[in-house]
Image: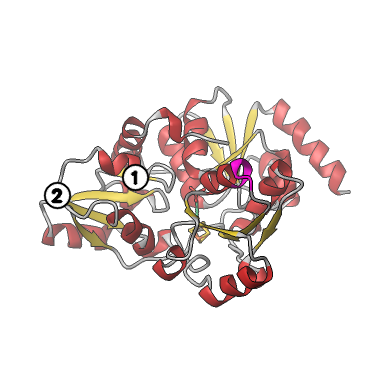
Amino acid sequence: MAMDLAKEILKLKREKNALILAHYYQPGIIQDLADYVGDSYYLSEIARDCKEEVIMFCGVRFMAESAKVLSPNKTVLMPCPSAGCSMADMASGKALLELKEKHPDAYVVCYINSTCNVKAHCDVAVTSSSALKILKKIPNKKIMFLPDRNLGEYISEFFPEKEFILWDGFCRCHNKVSREDILIEKEKHINAKVLVHPECTKEIRDIADYIGSTSGIIDYATKDEGTDFIIATEEGILHELKKKNPNKNFFIPGDKICCQDMKKTTLENLYDALLNMKNEMIIEENVRKKALRSLENMHLLASQDVRSN
Ligand code: 13P
Ligand code: SF4
């Protein structure tokens, strides 16, 4: 049955001239179906540059929204319209405007994990794979960063000369990764390296051998000569890690780091959305144009070598 549905999706995809994009946190069966799998930065570039008229974005809302902002003439669909990002929902455009009034001289940087209404009031967007590169190119001394406090704090450590105003948002799934769980895994696998996403807290970042985006973690584990890795990010990444490294071992601390929203995509809702062209991203043109500026600045300031798959 599952196989039939996968075949039907591929057939429909060709009929509708659609492209399927999937983030590394998506269920493995969805990653296997996708035309491109990647991190937030890479997928935003593919969405912008692809020739297909329809993009089926298997990820969460801010990713599909960004695709629509970048490609207003394409039809951008999601398998499940309620797949949001709890961190993105921790900042609103209205609250950002209030904070900006208090710091009119700040350069405003948003994580791509933010709503369109927030992006509309920012100078530039960043992803975890492009943030440091982009920040290096910003001359302003005062930086406002939202919504992820952990990523903001991580970036700020590289720029001691700058003043950072950090929003108090976080990812419910990365923020609760436990140091004890990592140490337990380290005791069991003494040579294992600890690879951490920067959305984790400082106490987790402090015991990391490597800190980086999903694509950065995959690249590191693939190139490293070690065989054991403790992975402090969402477990969907294991699919690509194991595919690229069948002879290496990967351990998730506490056995579970799971983004419920990323797991809302199923073959059934993907098929239904494609067949009926459901769950289309619609963004008010005024907001889209403003949000576009922050995403275009992101692509402009990030150099080619941040891309990955
Ligand atoms: P990446 O850009 O590293 O893929 O991260 C996206 C994300 O949502 C992390 O929680
Ligand atoms: Fe958002 Fe966290 Fe899920 Fe990433 S893992 S999409 S930050 S809730």
Q: Mark 1 or mark 2: name the one nearer the start of the chain.
A: 1
The residue at which mark 2 appears reads as 141
- Asked if marks 1 and 2 touch (Cβ < 8 Å), the reply is no
Q: Which mark is residue 132?
A: 1
Whether residue 285 is in magenta: the answer is: no
- Magenta stretch: includes residue 222: yes
Dot 1: few (<14), some (14–19), or many (≥20) neighbours within 10 Å?
A: some
The amino acid on which the numbered mark 2 sits, given as a three-letter code, is Lys
> Is there any visible trace of residue 161 in the rendered image?
yes
Q: Nearer the viewer, residue 103 or 119?
A: 103
Q: Residues within 10 Å of mark 2 (few under 14, many from 20)?
A: few
Residue 37 locus on image (x, y percent) = 62, 39
* Magenta extent: 221-225
Position of residue 95 in the picture relative to residue 69 (left or right)? left
Q: Residue 171 appears at what percent x and percent y?
A: 46, 64
* Residue behind label 1 places its C-beta within 8 angstroms of ligand 1: no
- The single residue placed furthest to the right in the displayed view is 1
Q: What secondary structure is the magenta-colored segment mainly?
A: helix
| Rendered image: mark on residue 259 | none
Q: CA distance from mark 1 to mark 2?
A: 15 Å
